[in-house]
Amino acid sequence: MTYAIKLTLTAQAMLYDVRDRRIMGKIRDRIDGLAYEPEKQGKALVGDLSSFRRLTALGRRYRIIYRVDREKLRVNVVGVGIRKEGDKSDIYHLARKLIRLGMTL
């Protein structure tokens, strides 16, 4: 089964904020790969992000935060960014903020 990939406007902006186009392309390739068996990829998150999964790109530097909608056969990508634990720009911190604001589709 093939899943459709949907990026939120915020996720699109986060992806396009990556200055190095080569890196952006590799992240995009990882996102495109989610069309096939997205629940077998990445890792399930816990706590207030428990309905989401994360996939790493470029080693473990970049994270792609997504949710799988089995009924609609769709993968909703809500965020793309670097893991910076304790920093305001940490991708998990930003994902929590997006959830609070209802910006996850």
Image: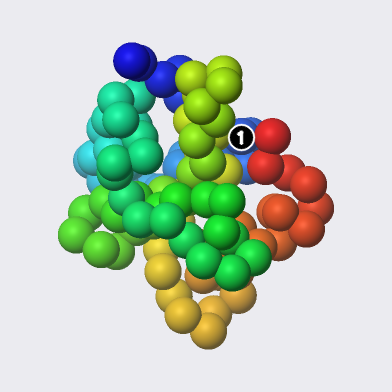
Q: Is residue 36 visible?
A: yes
User: 36 or 8: which is nearer to us?
Assistant: 36
Say whether residue 17 is left or right of residue 27. Answer: right
User: 40 or 101: which is nearer to us?
Assistant: 40
Q: Secondary structure at mark 1?
A: loop
Q: Position of residue 16 (x, y in %)?
A: 47, 40
Say whether residue 67 is left or right of residue 40. Answer: right
In the image as oriented, which residue stretches furthest toward the left? 59
In the image as oriented, which residue stretches furthest toward the top? 1
Instruction: Name the quadrant containing residue 13.
Output: top right
Q: Position of residue 20 (x, y in %)?
A: 30, 47
Residue visible at 59% across and 69% down? Answer: 47
Residue visible at 69% across and 34% down? Answer: 105
Say whether residue 26 is left or right of residue 43. Answer: left
Q: Amino acid at mark 1?
A: Thr
Q: Give the total of numbered labels.
A: 1
Residue visible at 60% across and 75% down? Answer: 88
**Quadrant in which the N terminus is drawn:** top left
Q: Position of residue 99 (x, y in %)?
A: 71, 54
In the image as oriented, which residue stretches furthest toward the front? 71
Instruction: Determine whether 99 is above or below 31 in the image.
Output: below
Q: Position of residue 60 (x, y in %)?
A: 25, 63
Residue visible at 29% across and 41% down? Answer: 40
In the image as oriented, which residue stretches furthest toward the bottom? 86
Q: From the image, tell me which residue sits under label 1.
A: 8
Say whether residue 79 is left or right of residue 30. Answer: right
